Structures are given as structure tokens and as C-alpha cells.
Image (tube, rainbow, N blue to C red):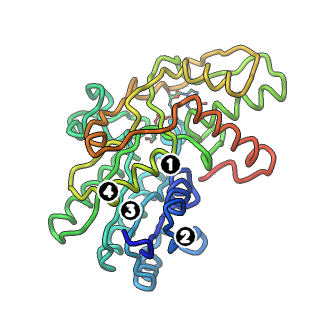
Amino acid sequence: MKQTAKIYVAGHRGLVGSALVRRLQASGFSNLLLPTRRELDLTRQQAVEDFFERERPDYVFLAAAKVGGIRANSVFAGDFIRDNLLIQTNVIESARRAGVSKLLFLGSSCIYPKFASQPIRESELMTGPLEPTNSAYAVAKIAGIEMVQAYRRQFDFPGICLMPTNLYGPGDNFDLENAHVAPALMRRFHEAKLSEAPEVTVWGSGRPRREFLHCDDLADAALLLMQEYDEAEIVNVGCGEDVSIAELAETIRDVVGYPGRLTFDASKPDGTPRKLLDVSRLFAIGWRPKIALRDGLEQAYQWYVENVETKGVRATVS
Ligand code: GFB
């Protein structure tokens, strides 16, 4: 990638997109296309076609998506499949027409079967039923993978696909109902600390296990793969180890400094029992994560207090 390359980061204000912008700028890439959602609605085909026709980016990081935690995926399943199919289809097709040098499509670890053998190899894709709480989102992401791979075969389209594990970090969505577990608990413990609430309720049994990767590590892996990887096969991006939700909650409680008790609400869904990714394909390319979970959670909490709690920065990225 030439330093002067024109790079479009779709979804640049989200958790992943903002990390990608930081990582690209740190490497001296300054010719970035960063239209806001108001300037470019990716669910509108004509608008996306016009944008690509006009701007003709060299590289595209497709990090724009409608995302959310286990509750949001269940409650807004129709929005999730519609918006994600529209966004990815419009961007991938317009990128093809514009003749981009390369497009990187971001999927998710939820594309794998609910009971995939652990750690989950990329070859497990579509070998079993999905987790019902996020099957709509997962099918949309699987369609995106299939589209990139079909475009590679039919049009020799230069697209690659990354499957990140659960992510967290600065720029996350901290909405108590619709966010992912790490930011939701961070805000819940913070508010309980301020209000001196005697206890905090964690959803589910606390027994499911999740792998967590800091968004800056993901951005680092994405830039490396954009530069070094050009195969049809999808690539898992994770850190190679997981924790239980109960362990995560205890760690976040400690990071926040909340003195009260934890309780678990078994009426809330656990979701997939485990989704630890096999990252040997990624590690074989030479990448390793740099940010340990505890350090990353402390940094993310610092960002939350400085940007969301005090300055009222949009706590939710819809
Ligand atoms: O991060 P999360 O919402 O999504 O939930 P998934 C992970 C686990 O955390 C579930 C528990 O077992 C929840 O019951 N949990 C405990 C909580 N307290 C909370 C809380 O306050 N908020 C939330 N959200 N969870 C997502 C998919 O699955 O993984 C997405 O729904 C995406 O589509 C993402 O793929 C990576 O990890 O279960």
C-alpha cells in the first residue's frame, strides 16, 4: 500500500472503524476517505455508487455494520439482517465497479455453529446450526463472505474476509441494553459505584466463555492482512484465549473499583456457550496480539470516563 493510497474506511466512527483510522494514521496513511453517515447512507445503493464513482478509493476497509450485543441481536433481528445485507452488498458491488485495488470485509465469530468444536477453525463455517440469538446477523455476515468469494471467482475481485472475535475498546457502544457485554458491564459497574448501589446484576449464568480482543489489536491485524494476505479463505482474528462471563465481570468490577456484590440473572440468555477462535492461520502469517485483557479493559474504562461519562459523547452507536 503506497503512503499516498486513497483509503476508504467504511464505519470510521465505530469501535473498529475508529481503531482502523488510528492505526492507518500511525503508519503515515493520510489520504483517508471518512464520510459521515449523514454524508453517505450505505443502505442507499445509488448514493454508494455515486460515492465510489466520484472518489475511486484504492483500498476499502468495510467496517460499517449494524452491530450489537445478545439482546439487540434478538430484539432487532430484522434491522440487523436488512441493514447489514444492504451495506455490504452496496459497498462490495460499488468497489468492484470502481476497480479498487483491495477490499477487506469484516465478519464476526458469531457466523460459526453454536456447538462448533473449540477452538473454532475457519473450516467449521456452515457445518451446523447457528446460535438463535444472533442468526439473522450471522446469516448476513455469511452472505458477505460468500459474496466476496463469489466475486473473487467470477470477477477476480480483490476481496479478503476477516472474522474477528468479541471486541472491546475506545469508541465502543455503551448502551446498557444494546451493547456487547464488556462495555455494558463497564458502564453498569461505573454507575453502581457512583450511586453506591449494593449490587450489580450480570445477565445469564456467567458460565459462557468469550474471547476478547482489543479493537487496536484488530486494526493492527487488519492492516497487516490488507497488505500481506490475498486468499479466498476467511481468517479468524483473536487472541487465542477466553474467559467466563463471571471472570470478565469480576475483572471489570475490579477495574472500575466497584465495591458491591455481583448477582446473576438466569432469566437472561447465555447465548453461545463458547466461541474461542482458532487463530493459527493468522499467527502463521506472523501476527500476534499486543494488548492483554486487563490492560485493555483499564484503557477502555479510562476512555469511557473521559469521553462518555463526562463529555456525553454518543454512548450508543446504533
Ligand atoms: O457480548 P454479548 O452481548 O454477545 O454477550 P455474544 C455475551 C455474554 O455476556 C452472554 C452475557 O452470555 C450474556 O448473557 N452478559 C452478561 C451480558 N451481562 C451482560 C450485559 O450486561 N450485556 C450483554 N450484552 N451481555 C455477540 C453477537 O454474541 O457477539 C453479535 O450477538 C456479535 O452478533 C458479537 O457476533 C461478537 O458474544 O453472546
Mark 3–mark 2 Cα distance, whole angstroms, equals 17 Å
Quick check: marks 4 and 3 in contact, CB under 8 Å? yes
Residue type, mark 3 in image: Gln
Q: Quadrant of residue 186?
A: top right
Residue type, mark 1 in image: Val
Q: Residues within 10 Å of mark 1 (few under 14, many from 20)?
A: many
User: What element does badge 1 sit on?
Assistant: loop
Which residue, given by chain and number where applicable, does mark 1 sit on?
67
Q: For residue 144, which numbered disc appears in the image?
A: 4
Which residue, given by chain and number where applicable, does mark 3 sit on?
88
Q: Nearer the viewer, residue 266 or 154?
A: 154
Q: For residue 34, which numbered disc appears in the image?
A: 2
Mark 2–mark 4 Cα distance, whole angstroms, equals 22 Å
Q: Residue at x 41, y 52 (%)?
A: 81
Task: Answer yes or no: disc 3 within 8 Å of ligand 1.
Answer: no
The spot of residue 29 in percent (x, y) is 49, 68
Residue type, mark 4 in image: Gly
The spot of residue 118 in percent (x, y) is 29, 25
Furthest-left residue in view?
153
The spot of residue 63 in percent (x, y) is 45, 57
Sequence-earlier tag: 2 or 4: 2
